[in-house]
Every structure is written in structure tokens, then in C-alpha cells.
Image (cartoon, helix red, strand yellow):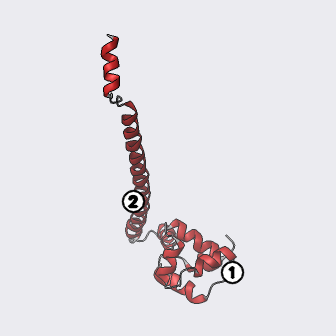
Amino acid sequence: MNSILERILYFAEYQNIKITNLEKKIGASKGVLSRAIAKNTDIQLKWIVSLVENYPQLNTEWLILGKSSMLKIELEADKIEENHTPYSNNINFQEKYYQCVEEKTALCDKNQQLYEEVIKLQKEIIQIQRESMPLKKTPATAVDDVCQV
């Protein structure tokens, strides 16, 4: 990733946030980030500052320079493991929280897919039932059946 915009896009995808929602959260007009990403143009510093203020877990060194970890939690977890401080449990809870959020998002997506599959299958069942229903006999065909006996 060479540019700040690429890293913003990556962060949004990682957080499972649409760029338009990210724009709203940082107070930018609709299209400020998406147009800049599409056209590969620069954005104003105030949007970067707002992004960092609204997403405190985002590592500014990664965002601006592309160095280190994307999330501050990852950095702090590395430091804690090196120093073996008593705060490591807090980081583990945060990591587990983020994992749970990611899992919840994945499960919601899977649930939506399954719901759509159920609807599709229900429609197929209705169609098959319609096709397998015997044709109603008109009085003329009923007479023909009787005469053939």
C-alpha cells in the first residue's frame, strides 16, 4: 500500500465499513473519500485528523507512513508481550472483543445468505407444487372419461 488513501480503504474494509459510512462518521461530505480514492487524489489533513479522532484504535504511523501495525492494539499487545506487564489481560479482552465483532459481522452476512437461500427454495417449492397439481377437468373432459369406460 503506497498511499494514505489505499490505507484508508484497507482500514474501512478491515472494519467492514463502507466508505460512505466512514465519510459520515468523520463529518465529510458524501464522496470526499470515494472520489479521492477513485481519482487517486489527495485529501485534506482535516479528514485524516477526523479519521484518527473517530477511530482511536487506528495507528497514525501506519496511516500516514505505512509503517508498523494498522491498529494500536496490535502495537500495545506486542509491547506488553515483550515487557510482560500486568495489563496484558486488558489487551486480550480488547482483541477478543474485536474478534467477536468480526465474527458477528461474518455470521450476519452468512445469516443473510442463508435467508436468501431459504426464500429461493421456498419459491422453488411453490413452483414445483403448482406444476405437480393435477389439471382440473372441464365438464367436456369428464364426459369423455365416462364414455371411454
Residue 78 sits above or below residue 138 on the image: below
**Quarter location, residue 6:** bottom right
Judged from this view, the residue extending furthest toward the top is 149
Residue 7 sits above or below residue 101 on the image: below
Q: Nearer the viewer, residue 136 or 138?
A: 138
Question: Which secondary structure lies at badge 2?
Answer: helix
Q: Measure the alpha-carbon separation of dots 1 and 2.
A: 34 Å
Please state which of the two labelled residues, at mark 1 or mark 2, is closer to the viewer. Answer: 1
**Can you give x and y, in whole percent of width and height, for residue 67 in the image?**
63, 74
Q: Nearer the viewer, residue 57 or 147?
A: 147
Identify which residue is drawn at 35% across, 23% down. Answer: 141
Mark closest to the chain's N terminus, 1 or 2? 1
Residue 53 is at least partly visible in this image: yes
Q: Amino acid at mark 1?
A: Thr
> Which quadrant of the figure contains the C terminus?
top left
Identify which residue is drawn at 38% across, 46% down. Answer: 118
Residue 38 sits above or below residue 103 on the image: below
Residue 61 is at least partly visible in this image: no
Give the side of residue 27 with respect to residue 64, left or right. left
**Quarter location, residue 121:** top left
Identify which residue is drawn at 48% across, 69% down. Answer: 77
Residue at which label 2 appears: 104
**Can you give x and y, in whole percent of width and height, for residue 2 in the image?**
69, 73
Residue 97 sits above or below residue 123 on the image: below
Residue at which label 1 appears: 41
Counting other residues with Cα less than 10 Å from the Cα at mark 2, is it few (<14), some (14-19), or many (20 or more)? few
Q: Amino acid at mark 2?
A: Lys
Question: Which secondary structure lies at badge 1?
Answer: loop
Q: Nearer the viewer, residue 66 or 51?
A: 51
Counting other residues with Cα less than 10 Å from the Cα at mark 1, is it few (<14), some (14-19), or many (20 or more)? few
